[in-house]
Image (cartoon, grey):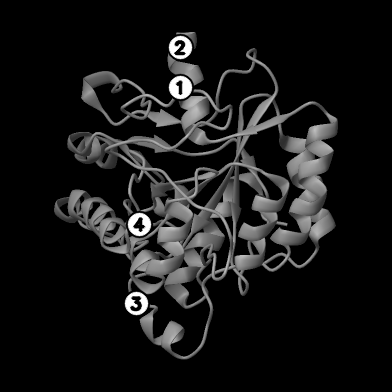
């Protein structure tokens, strides 16, 4: 089980050749949709604003950081799935390693569970059809997880680091990859590789206009084989407004899809409603 403050260790293994991978949708039905220029349909079916909700900049104009939605506005929870593929993993993909999990995406569709996919640009370049399918499906929204999946701070669990001068370019390169893949509206949300950030990174990315999105519930699904343990960790951690970090990859998170088959019905029994990160951020902004 990966401790709450150590989920990033699993992400960092990508630098050592054991990267967490992404979600895919080969042959999956449906029609997707999310993005910065214009958002996707809301899980509630309400009209979507012309611009996705973001948080106001922090002190000194720093990039704002979002970890969870309001606790007192009903039982909502956002499931997020990191689509991690590092810049140097092309040879592994060419050798037959699959950085996707169509079954997991289909399970989300079957359960009608909206979700936010934090995708690296490298993954979108590798799987453009799958990125496009996720990005055009109103059930999902695509957010930015950098292009390279290299760290934005030093000493981030062994990940290679992006220079300060290269941080903004790496984020913008990911958005360019989404456009090439045909993702119509990638959201203005960014998740730091490894979950590692500091004041310098927040200051540097302020010009991009994104809201940094972390989490308050770690699923422990990275490299886990016990789906019951993953489900239990999520069910014990979720509170109203929670953001859950998970992964969808056949090789590095093999238990996640099975865990979802327990997590979704159990949370619904407890009265929880699944929403996207944009819904939680919008509720947070309105609650202020």
- Of labels 4 and 3, earlier in sequence is 3
- Of labels 2 and 4, earlier in sequence is 4
Residue located beneath label 2 in the image: 286
Q: Are marks 2 and 1 in contact (CB under 8 Å)?
A: yes
Measured Cα–Cα span from mark 4 to mark 3 = 14 Å
The residue most toward the top is 288
State the image quarter where residue 173 is shown.
bottom left
Residue located beneath label 1 in the image: 282
Measured Cα–Cα span from mark 3 to mark 2 = 41 Å
Q: Check disc 3 and report its element: helix, strand or loop.
A: loop
State the image quarter where residue 56 is shown.
top left
Between label 4 and label 1, give the one nearer the viewer: 1
Q: Position of residue 210 (x, y in %)?
A: 30, 36
Measured Cα–Cα span from mark 4 to mark 1 = 28 Å
The residue most toward the left is 165
Q: Nearer the viewer, residue 223 or 174?
A: 174
Residue located beneath label 3 in the image: 88
Q: Position of residue 207 (x, y in %)?
A: 17, 36
- Of labels 3 and 1, earlier in sequence is 3
Measured Cα–Cα span from mark 2 to mark 1 = 6 Å
Measured Cα–Cα span from mark 3 to mark 1 = 36 Å
In the image: residue 110, left or right of residue 182: right
In the image: residue 123, left or right of residue 7: left
Q: Position of residue 276 (x, y in %)?
A: 54, 36
96, above or below 78, in the image: below
- Of labels 3 and 2, earlier in sequence is 3
23, above or below 3, in the image: below
Q: Residue at point 31% right, 28% down?
A: 51
Q: Check disc 1 and report its element: helix, strand or loop.
A: helix
Residue located beneath label 4 in the image: 151
Between label 3 and label 2, give the one nearer the viewer: 2
The residue most toward the bottom is 95
């Amino acid at each position: 089980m990966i401790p709450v403050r150590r989920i990033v260790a699993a992400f960092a293994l990508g630098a050592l050749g054991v990267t967490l991978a992404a979600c895919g949708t080969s042959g999956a039905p449906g029609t997707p949709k999310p993005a910065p220029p214009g958002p996707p349909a809301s899980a509630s079916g309400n009209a979507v604003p012309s611009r996705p909700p973001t948080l106001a900049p922090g002190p000194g104009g720093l990039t704002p950081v979002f970890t969870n939605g309001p606790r007192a506005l009903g039982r909502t929870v956002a499931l997020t799935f990191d689509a991690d593929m590092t810049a140097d993993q092309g040879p592994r993909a060419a050798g037959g390693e699959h950085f996707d999990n169509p079954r997991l995406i289909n399970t989300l569709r079957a359960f009608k569970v909206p979700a936010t996919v934090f995708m690296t640009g490298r993954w979108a370049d590798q799987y453009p059809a799958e990125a496009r399918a996720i990005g055009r499906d109103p059930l999902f929204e695509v957010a930015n997880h950098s292009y390279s999946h290299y760290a934005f701070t030093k000493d981030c669990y062994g990940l290679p680091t992006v220079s300060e001068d290269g941080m903004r370019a790496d984020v913008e390169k990911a958005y360019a990859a989404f456009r090439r893949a045909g993702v119509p509206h990638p959201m203005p949300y960014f998740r730091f590789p490894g979950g590692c950030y500091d004041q310098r990174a927040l200051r540097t990315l302020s010009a991009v206009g994104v809201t940094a999105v972390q989490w308050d519930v770690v699923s422990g699904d990275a490299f886990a084989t016990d789906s019951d343990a993953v489900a239990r960790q999520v069910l014990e951690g979720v509170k109203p407004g929670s953001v859950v970090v998970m992964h969808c990859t056949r090789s590095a998170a093999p238990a996640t899809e099975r865990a979802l088959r327990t997590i979704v019905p159990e949370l619904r029994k407890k009265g929880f409603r699944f929403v996207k990160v944009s819904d939680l951020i919008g509720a947070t902004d309105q609650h202020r």
